[in-house]
Image: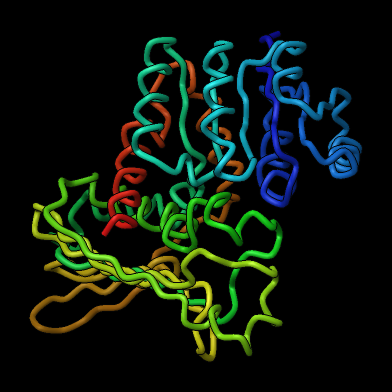
Amino acid sequence: MNKLIKVAIVGTGHIAEKFHLPAWQKNKKIKIVAICDINQKKLDLVANKFKVKSKYTELKIMVKNEDIDILNICTPPYLHYEQIKLAIKNNINVLVEKPFIVSKKKFLLIKKNSIKKKLTCTCALHQRFRPISRKIKKLIDRKLIGDIYYINILKRQFRGIPRHSKFFSEKKFSGGGPLIDLGSHYLDLVFWFLKFPKIDSYSNFNFNNITRMNTNKKYLPFKKFNAEELSVGQIFCKNNTLVNYELGYALNQKENITSIEIFGTKGSIRWPSGELTLTKNNKNYISKIKIKEKKASFLQVNDFIENYKKRNKTCVNLNEVGYIVELIDNLYAK
């Protein structure tokens, strides 16, 4: 019988409870040996729900007491750097909920130390693992829609400031608003499709019009909100592809929209609907990309377990994570 891989989780909030823990629990090659959270009440509830015996309120003590192969970090972004550093120091591989880290400088230190220790350290970017994303990636790589020259990312929400954690409301905890929170997923997905080309130029504009209005403050989920509510910008790549994005928590609109439109010289693809348009002889032929639905969080965990011993062979390797960290860092500095 193969030895089970020992996994520990720090952070037992919404993301861990709804996505990470169920995915780890479903994988037959691992054992959840311990969980950690500073909130004792939440820790007890989650430990009982997932039948985890060992629980801690201090990460340092958990790392010291437990034999851990993989640490899954599901805490607020401002804690990630120190927690990743602690794991690497103790020779533990790391899977971190997005956003991975909030600065390029700290990312480079993590990269240096993880390489030195020959550990796998990467970010949980489950949008890549959605079956529709994997299928679209294959079609793009086959150049089914030709050479891609324009991509439009739309993530518009009426009142979509995340409510499940108070740490989304202040930039010192979250790293920012939708640009880092939503952008970590959707910019990563797009540039994964494009194979992470070199960037020529970019622009970014942040807005706080809705959340700043006194009449709206009583409707906000938190008393204080000092991150951006909307980011709009463009990224021009050296391969002549233009990426346009609108990432918003709060817009006055009828309905929420999540869409990525990918335009090529032979057709277009819309994500996540899977609408495929091929243009031949000046006529459009529209079809639907067929997939078998599977939970992205489960597929992500399976990929990590199968590949974490082959450092940077996981679907999301550390160099790609660094590309997005640097890009978002630069966009905020614009």
Q: Is residue 87 left or right of residue 311?
A: right
Q: Is residue 45 above or below residue 290?
A: above
Q: Is residue 120 above or below residue 228?
A: above
For the N terminus, which image quadrant? top right
Residue 68 percent across, percent down from the top left: 67, 15
Q: Nearer the viewer, residue 211 or 192?
A: 211
Q: Measuring 69% from the left and 58% from the top, which residue is drawn there?
A: 166
* Number of numbered discs overlaid on the protein picture: 0
Q: Is residue 282 left or right of residue 308?
A: left
Q: Residue furthest front?
A: 214
For the C terminus, which image quadrant? bottom left
Q: Measuring 69% from the left and 56% from the top, which residue is drawn there?
A: 165
In this picture the colour scheme is rainbow
Asked if residue 316 shows in the view, the reply is yes
Q: Measuring 48% from the left and 40% from the top, which residue is drawn there?
A: 100
Residue 9 found in image quarter: top right
Q: Nearer the viewer, residue 56 or 105?
A: 105
Asked if residue 270 shows in the view, the reply is no
Q: Is residue 259 left or right of residue 278?
A: right
Q: Is residue 226 above or below residue 256?
A: above
Residue 70 percent across, percent down from the top left: 61, 22
Q: Nearer the viewer, residue 85 or 212?
A: 212
Q: Is residue 127 above or below residue 71?
A: below
Q: Measuring 59% from the left and 67% from the top, which residue is drawn there?
A: 225
Q: Nearer the viewer, residue 184 or 165?
A: 165
Residue 221 percent across, percent down from the top left: 70, 71
Residue 254 percent across, percent down from the top left: 53, 91
